[in-house]
Image: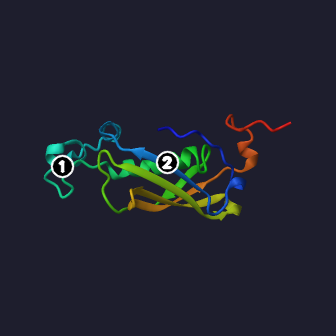
Amino acid sequence: MFPELRLLCFEDLAIGMTETLTKTIASSDVVGFAEVTGDRNPIHLSEHFAARTPFGTRIAHGLYTASLISAVLGTRLPGPGAVYISQTLNFRAPVKIGDTVEVKVEVAELIPERRRARLACTCRVGEEVVLDGEAWVKVPPRSETERSPLARPAAG
């Protein structure tokens, strides 16, 4: 599931650039997220409890789904070295165990003087938007990324 790392500097970004990640949600993902965060709400962990809710079955933590956005930002667009500044999240529908979530991140705005990027973020299960929002990130310039161990050597 781990996406290959891609290092982009601010100068590489353009409005409209996109990156996607697809993840099928396993019970072990939800249990692991509960263990890491301490959020043991039984709607996530107990099929018996969840069956009596409007969802009828266990659902993934909303912030687990949101963390898949973080995976895209930290590994692919913009990638290593980007610093999260803020994130808005709108939870539109539940994500159930076994659902396949497609995360799409798109560059919506660039502020060169501050090296900031606004990214539109959408998570879908099939055609249904389950989560959307936007992220602001600070992206390092080429002068900083050239020193990164992930930077490719110059052709020569």
Q: Earlier in the sequence, mark 2 or mark 1?
A: 2
**Which tag is nearer the camera, tag 2 or tag 1?**
2
Where is the C terminus found, in terms of image quarters? top right
Residue positioned most to the right: 156
Label 1 CA crowd tier, 10 Å (few <14, some 14–19, many 20+): some
Residue at position x 71%, y 51% in the image: 141
Tell me the residue that label 1 is attached to: 50
Q: Specify the amino acid type for callout 1.
A: Ala
Determine the secondary structure under disc 2: strand
Is label 2 in contact with label 1 (beta carbons under 8 Å)?
A: no
Question: In screen coordinates, is 108 left or right of 31?
Answer: right
Tell me the residue that label 2 is attached to: 21
Determine the secondary structure under disc 1: helix
Q: Quadrant of residue 42?
A: top left
Between 54 and 85, the residue placed more toward the observer is 54
Residue at position x 28%, y 44% in the image: 39
Q: Specify the amino acid type for callout 2.
A: Leu
Residue 63: x, y in percent? 37, 51
Label 2 CA crowd tier, 10 Å (few <14, some 14–19, many 20+): some
Residue 102: x, y in percent? 44, 52
Residue at position x 76%, y 46% in the image: 143
Determine the CA span between mark 2 and mark 1: 28 Å
Q: How is the image coloured?
A: rainbow
Between 136 and 108, the residue placed more toward the observer is 108
Residue at position x 15%, y 50% in the image: 51
Question: In screen coordinates, is 6 left or right of 67?
Answer: right
Question: From this viewpoint, is residue 89 visible?
Answer: no
Q: Which mark is residue 113?
A: none
**Looking at the picture, does residue 50 appear above or below residue 122?**
above
Residue 155: x, y in percent? 82, 38
